[in-house]
Amino acid sequence: MNHLFLLLLILPLLWQCNIDAKTRQNKKNKEWKTENNTQINTIQTPKYDSIVLTNSGFKGYYQGPEYNEQGDLAHQFSNKAARLIGDFLKAAYNKQNYLKVNFKKTKIYTKNLDQKDSVYYEIEMPFEKVTKCKAFTGIEHCGSWDQQPKKEITERLLKLKKGLREHCSIGAMEYQYFVSNEGFQEYWVQFMHRDYQVPCKD
């Protein structure tokens, strides 16, 4: 009789342990999946940006931490935009679709730029169709996320243009200075890439 009573007392505890083990396994399965007997981590890093890139132009935004341990995380969205736009212009050129960025209609906007928490950073760059030797196949930028004097930004622009001429640019360049309502400053430069537009050299 005592054994039966003891068994009835232990059974609920064993049942609860089995449920807890299954719950832990389910949580683990959400973080890991097995493929070919190899565990693969499926946890992804946060995605802070959204981008649309077509023959009409580039439109994208970053919304997330302004800084982290690696520096000005938000300003790195400019690097991503420049890489994607440059790749797009080159691919379009190879298809005889000659494009350039319309800097006059370009918009750059920031919100909550205070070096404290989350920031919103938006870039809108329309493209325009042009003739073969008016097209651009490269784009770069330099700027300041922390309100440096414009003189310093302009000096960086001169170094950037010099570096482009030495390494990959030929012919004409176009550049434009942008400043947001909160003081974010950036120069954007578009140029003819020597790997694509040698016949267009001045």
Image (tube, rainbow, N blue to C red):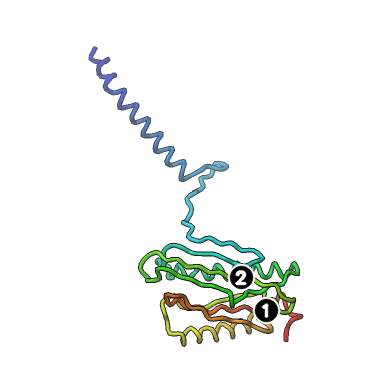
Which image quarter: residue 139? bottom right
Q: Residues within 10 Å of mark 1 (few under 14, many from 20)?
A: many
Distance between mark 1 and mark 2 Cα atoms: 18 Å
- The answer to which of marks 1 and 2 sits earlier in the sequence is 2
Query: Horizontally, is 186 left or right of 192 in the view?
Result: left
On the image, numbered disc 2 is attached to which residue? Answer: 126
- Residue 58: percent from the left, percent from the top? 59, 67
Residue farthest front in this picture: 105
Q: Position of residue 35 (x, y in %)?
A: 56, 43
Q: Label 1 amino acid?
A: Met
The picture places residue 107, in percent across and down from the top left corner, at 53, 72
* Amino acid carrying mark 2 in the image: Pro
Q: In the image, what residue occupies the spot 64% across and 75% down?
A: 138
- Circle 1 is placed at which residue position? 192
Q: How many marks?
A: 2
Q: Depth check: 25 or 97 in front? A: 97
* Front residue of 126 and 145: 126
Q: Look at the image and tell me in which quarter the C terminus lies.
A: bottom right
Name the outermost residue toward the left.
2
Q: Residue at x 48, y 60 (%)?
A: 48
Task: Work out whether 63 lies above or below 132.
Answer: above
Please give the name of the residue rendered at 51% of the width and 64% of the height, measured from the top-left corner. 61
**Is mark 1 in CB contact (under 8 Å) with mark 2?**
no
Eyeballing the image, is 171 above or below 105?
below
The N terminus sits in image quarter: top left
Q: Is residue 35 left or right of residue 171?
A: left
Q: Write the residue at 63% across / 74% down.
A: 101
